[in-house]
Amino acid sequence: MAEPASLKVSVWRGGADGALARFEVPARENQTVLDVVTHIQRELDPSLAYRFACRVGMCGSCAMTVNGRARWTCRTHVRKVVGPDGALELRPLANLPVIRDLAADLTPFFEKWRRARGRFEPREAPDGAVPEDFAVVPPASRARREADAGIECIGCGVCYASCDVVAWNPDYLGPAALNRAWTLVNDVRDGARAERLDAVAGDAGCHSCHSTQSCTERCPKGLDPSSAIAGLKRTLFWDTLFGRR
Amino acid sequence: MSARGQTHLWVVQRVTAMLLAIAVTVHLVTIVIAVRGGLTAAEILARTRGSEGWLAFYCVFALAAGLHGAIGLRAIAAETLGLRGRGADLAWVAIGLLTAAFGIRAAIGLYA
Amino acid sequence: MDLRPRSHPTYLAFVVHRVSGLLLALFLPLHFWVLGTAITGEARLEGFLRWADNPLVKAAETVLVVLLAAHLAGGLRVLALEFLGWRSRQKDLVAASAGIALLAGLAFLLNVV
C-alpha cells in the first residue's frame, strides 16, 4: 500500500464543549502519534495543549484517545493506527474531565486510588516506625505471584478511560485502583486488608465490574486488571459467605 | 443501600447463578426431549404430577431465576437509567420475590 | 457510542450476556404467569399448548432457547473467571459459549419440527 504523503489529523480543541480541528501533518517513515502531536504544536499551532514527559513508555503521561481507542501516543506508531486515507483522530482520554485540548485531568483517577486504599500500610509498623527485621516473602508463594502480576502499573489511566462501567457509574473506582488494591491484599506485609476489602466492596467497587475486559485488552503494560477485580470478588464472596465480614 | 448490602446482593446473584447453571442445563435437556413428537398436557403432567422431586426442582429453580433476573435488571437500570438508591434496591428484591412466587405457583400447579 | 474500541471477543460476550439477560428477565414473569394460569386444568393446559403449535410461537421459542443457552454458557465463562481465575483462555471460552448457544438452538429446532 502506498503511504499517503500527509496525515489528515483531527485534534480535539477546547474543553468539554470543544470541537475537532483539522491539521495536515507530513507523513514520515518512522513516526509515533506523539511525534505528530509535537509537530502540530511546534510547527502549526503553539497553543495546542497536551502532556508528555519521557517519550519512551515509562512515565505514562502521554495517553490519549487515538482513533477511538486509549493508547500511549509515544509507543504507538502512526502506520499501525492510521486509516488508508491518512486519517488520524486524537482526543483526550475518555471518562475524565478535559482541561484543554488533549490534556485530561487525572484528579478523579488518583482520588479513586486513594479511596480504594491504594497506599501500602505496613503491618509491623503502623506508626511509621522501621520494623525490627525484614519480612520474609517467598517469591513463588501464591499471594506474591498474584501481587507481582499487577505491580507494574504506572497509573497512565488507559484502562480507566477504556472502561464502560466508569462511564456508566461515576462512583466506580475503576480498573487501576482495584488492581492496586488487589496487589496490596496479596501483600503479606500489609496490615489494612480488612479496611481495604471494605473500601473496594459494593457498587462503587469490584462488584460493578462486568468482565468486558477492556482494561486487560488495552493495558499497555500487558497487565490484567480484570483478573485482579475477579480476585477481589472471589475473596469478598468467601468472606461474606462464611460471615468473616 | 450500604456497600455491605450491595455485596450481599452480588453474592445472591452469584449463588443463584451457580444453582441456575445446573437448573438451566436440566431445563434445556428436558425441553429438547419433551418437544420430540409434540408437546401434550398429558405427557407433561404424567412427568410432574405427584413428583416431589420435580416440585422441589422447579421451586428452587423459580426462586433462583426470580432473584437472579431482578438483580440483573437492577444493574441495567442503574447503569442505563441512573436508577439507584435504597428504594430502588428494595423494589428490585420485591420484584424478584414476586416473580419467584409466580413461578412457585406454576410449579405447585404442575405437582397438584 | 464509539464502537471501534468495543470489538474484542470478551466485549461482544458482555453485550450478548446483557441483551440475553434483559430479554430473559422480561420474559420470566410472563412465562411464570401464563404457565401458572394454564396449569389450572389439563384441558386448559392442552388448549394453551395447541395455541403454542403456531409456527410463530415455535420461532419465538427457538430464539428463547438460544438466548437461554447463550446466557448460560456466557455466565459459566464469567464464573470461571471470577471463581476459578481462568484468565488465559477467555477468548476460547467466548467461542465455546457461542457454539453451545447455537447447538442448543439447533437441537431444539430439530426436535420440535
Image (cartoon, grey):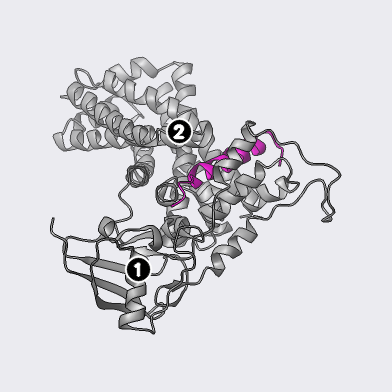
Query: Residue C86 in the image: x percent, y percent?
Result: 47, 32
Quadrant occupied by the C terminus of chain C: top left
| Residue shown at the point (47%, 40%) measured from the top left | B68
Quadrant occupied by the N terminus of chain C: bottom left
Q: Quadrant of residue C59?
A: top left
Q: Is residue A54 above or below residue A229?
A: below
The foreground one among A173 and C36 is A173
Asked if residue A1 is among those painted magenta in the image, a careful observer would answer no
Quick check: marks 2 and 1 in contact, CB under 8 Å? no
Mark 1 crowd level (few <14, some 14–19, many ≥20, 10 Å Cα): some
Q: Is residue C113 left or right of residue A169?
A: left
**Magenta highlight range:** A220-245
Q: Is residue A99 left or right of residue C30?
A: right
Mark 1 sits on what residue? A35
Chain of the residue under label 1: A
Q: Is residue B56 left or right of residue B37?
A: right
Residue type at mark 2: give it: Ala
- SS for tag 1? helix
Q: Is residue A99 above or below residue C32?
A: below
Mark 2 sits on what residue? B62
The foreground one among C42 and A12 is A12
The foreground one among A105 and B60 is A105
Query: Residue A172 in the image: x percent, y percent?
Result: 53, 58
Viewer can see residue C35: no
Viewer can see residue A195: yes
The foreground one among A50 and B28 is A50
Residue type at mark 1: give it: Asp
Chain of the residue under label 2: B
Query: Residue A77 in the image: x percent, y percent?
Result: 31, 58
| Residue shown at the point (56%, 40%) measured from the top left | A231
